[in-house]
Image: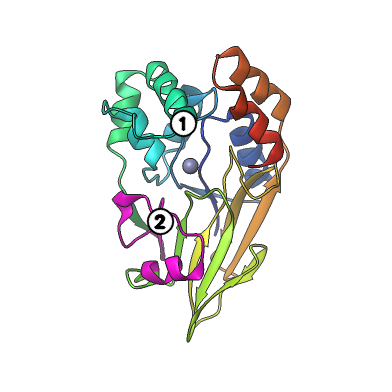
Amino acid sequence: MRIAIFGDIHANLEALEAVLEDARAQGTTDYVCMGDIVGYNADPAACLEIVKEMNCPVIKGNHDEDASGEHSLESMNPVAAAALEWTRAQLSEEQRQWLRRLRMVRQVADFTIVHATLDQPANWNYVTNRFDAMSNFSYQFTQLCFHGHTHVPRVYVKSDKVHEVPAESIAIEPNSKYFINVGSVGQPRDGDWRACYAIYDIDHNLVVFRRVEYDIKKTQEKILAAGLPEMLAERLADGR
Ligand code: ZN
């Protein structure tokens, strides 16, 4: 069984379609979505409908929560807040309700999924180093846990201690635990503009990261046409 694990789509339809096409070509049969389907880019409703139709396990991201709530966005950075205001107006009540009902943590097959961290999923903490990863491992009861949120693909391994290994091709060893950030489909921030996701090959104990080119010009044009902050179009090309 080969499972495509993808998230932080952020309303980037061209990137989502490219990733799903790549995943099919790679022989994946199952899909898991790590949340943040909406926010930032110009196609929140279309991306939501695609993921909803896939009927796969999905967990809630902070942008899904903010876009489906009615609370004030004042404390948020102005660019993200402007995009979320716009996103709220694009979604139907039914779509917002679907987002609101997503769960924070799920177990799928033999692994766990969470958008941010397992220790306090609703606090949306960022895992940027092995010390952050350590707090997560205390709450991780499956060998593998996949997450997202930082938009940077990373792999933390806990054997006798916690260390980081390059996010490329990971052979899962029996006596270690893995906390794996699958990167971002729609707004990567590791300096590579291409859409990022991972494939978990359960039969071969292997996790492989994939980078996929998409029609970024089209995505940028839609962002500008929607009147969203220009910076959101620019950052896509920089992968930041
Ligand atoms: Zn995100």
The residue wearing badge 1 is 80
| Residue 7 in the image, given as x and y percentages of width and height | 51, 44
| Residue 170 in the image, given as x and y percentages of width and height | 62, 69
- The quarter of the rendered structure image containing the C terminus is top right
Please determine whether, in this image, residue 124 is positioned above or below residue 65.
below
Element type at marker 2? strand
Element type at marker 1? helix
Please determine whether, in this image, residue 209 is positioned above or below residue 149.
below
Disc 1 packing (10 Å; few <14; some 14–19; many ≥20):
some
Please identify the quarter of the rendering in which residue 60 is found: top left
Disc 2 packing (10 Å; few <14; some 14–19; many ≥20):
many
Along the viewing direction, whichever of 129 and 220 lies nearer the viewer: 129
The residue wearing badge 2 is 113
Q: Magenta part of the protein: which range?
A: 108-136
Can you see residue 39? no
Is the residue indicated by label 2 positioned so its CB lies within 8 Å of ligand 1? no
Which mark lies nearer to you, 2 or 1? 1
Q: Is 128 covered by the magenta stretch?
A: yes
Q: Residue at x 72, y 25 (%)?
A: 217
